[in-house]
Amino acid sequence: MSRSALLFTPGPLSTSSTVKEAMLEDMGSRDHAFVKAVKDIREGLLKLAHAPKEEGYECVIMQGSGTFGVESVISSVVGEKDKLLILANGAYGERIAKMAKIHKLNHAVLRFDEDSIVTPEAVEAFLKDNNDITHVACIHSETTTGLFNPVGDIGAVCKKYNKVFIVDAMSSFGGVVMDMVALYIDFLVSSSNKCIEGVPGFAFALCKKSELEKAKGQARSLSLDLYDQWYGLETNGQFRFTPPTLSIMAFQQAMKELEEEGGISAREERYKTNKKILDEGMHQLGFQQYLSPEIQGHIITSFLYPDSPDFKFDRFYNKLNERGFVIYPGKLSKADAFRIGNIGQIFPDDVRALLKAIEEVMKEEGVGVN
Ligand SMILES: *Cc1c(COP(=O)(O)O)cnc(C)c1O
């Protein structure tokens, strides 16, 4: 069997063979092994977020990709008389703005440049002037660029003004130590195929129960009704509609492997090491990063196209692909860049191998970056 390509992307990611093997048995949705996996995952995720059930937090699993999870929260928890403030500095913030528009929510968007973070000062000033805001939504790791928004400081502002705080921590949860309570997060959303290193199939929302309960009967969609989904899971342990059975089994194994690695802090260290090796190697090859280092996170990095007429991204991408390395195109509105992720089953030697392949391709293409 040929070795599969390594994914240096923001997801789906490279997964371990044992995670993939966990999907080899057909599994009915009422099989007790499956019901137990769902229970273990729901409890385990709350523990990872330092937000246990006993302290009033709940985990809802929602079929679909990460966006389904965000949309479930956004379209269920913002009531008819509420108003949502969306903090946007990239494509994922804009995606929430689009959801708000489609579901006809009362909302406002506070925009920041793609190369700068959301500042708590700007959020505070906005909330002072707009006291009709009830909910605030923000992206933690803005995968568009790779920056980290200061969710703890923004959360403190939300707390001070008594706003419900919703965080899309899709690409960072599991790869960054996060204490949901200390960060004042009421709803945190991530998915199966990011830093927990499972396969695609579902999203999950970690919710403050007292806020989740307010969503009863106010969803704008049947399948994405966050409260009803929770109620089903809570009462009979079942999903309302066909669950992603095999993806759940893989995720249970992925959570076990996360623990074996040493938990989130150990995984964070591995990702940071990957990032350091990548940064140094790319710098030596002459590549420039899009973001300034103070706001750059360790999940994914945007590199500017080299200033050379011989650089053609499609050729670069394909040649790396042929060598077994999958990188990611850019998504910036103002600059040409590509992205390289450090997350998933990627280890320092894999990053070194990628750097070597990049060097070879640059030579072959006659692109002098230096
Ligand atoms: C991956 C990601 C999502 C979800 O994307 P899907 O394609 O729906 O899984 C949402 N927000 C951020 C910040 C992401 O990185």
Image: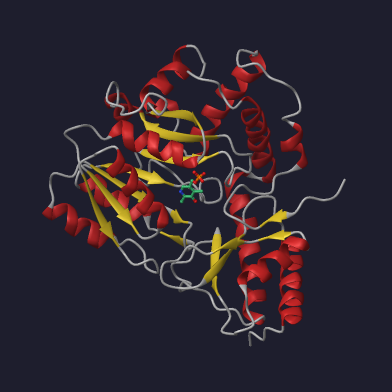
- Assign the C terminus to one quadrant of the image: bottom right
Image quadrant assignment for residue 346: bottom right
**Quarter of the figure that contains the N terminus:** top right
In this view, the residue in front, 222 or 339, is 222
Q: Which residue is pictured at 61% across the width and 16% down the height?
A: 29
For this view, does 196 lie left or right of residue 296? right
Q: Is residue 81 above or below residue 148?
A: above
Residue at (43, 34) in percent of width and height: 206
Residue 38, image x, y percentages: 57, 23
Please determine whether, in this image, residue 2 is positioned above or below residue 354.
Answer: above
Q: Is residue 152 left or right of residue 341?
A: left
Q: Residue at x 69, y 39 (%)?
A: 257
Coloring applied to the structure: secondary structure
176 or 296, which lies in front?
296
Q: Nearer the viewer, residue 237 or 339?
A: 339
Instruction: Give x and y (percent) for residue 149.
Output: 39, 58
Q: Residue at x 24, y 62 (%)?
A: 121
Toward the viewer: 341 or 159? 341
Image quadrant assignment for residue 58: top left
In the image, residue 7 lies at what x, y percent?
67, 54
Examine the rendered structure and indicate whether residue 157 appears above or below residue 256: below
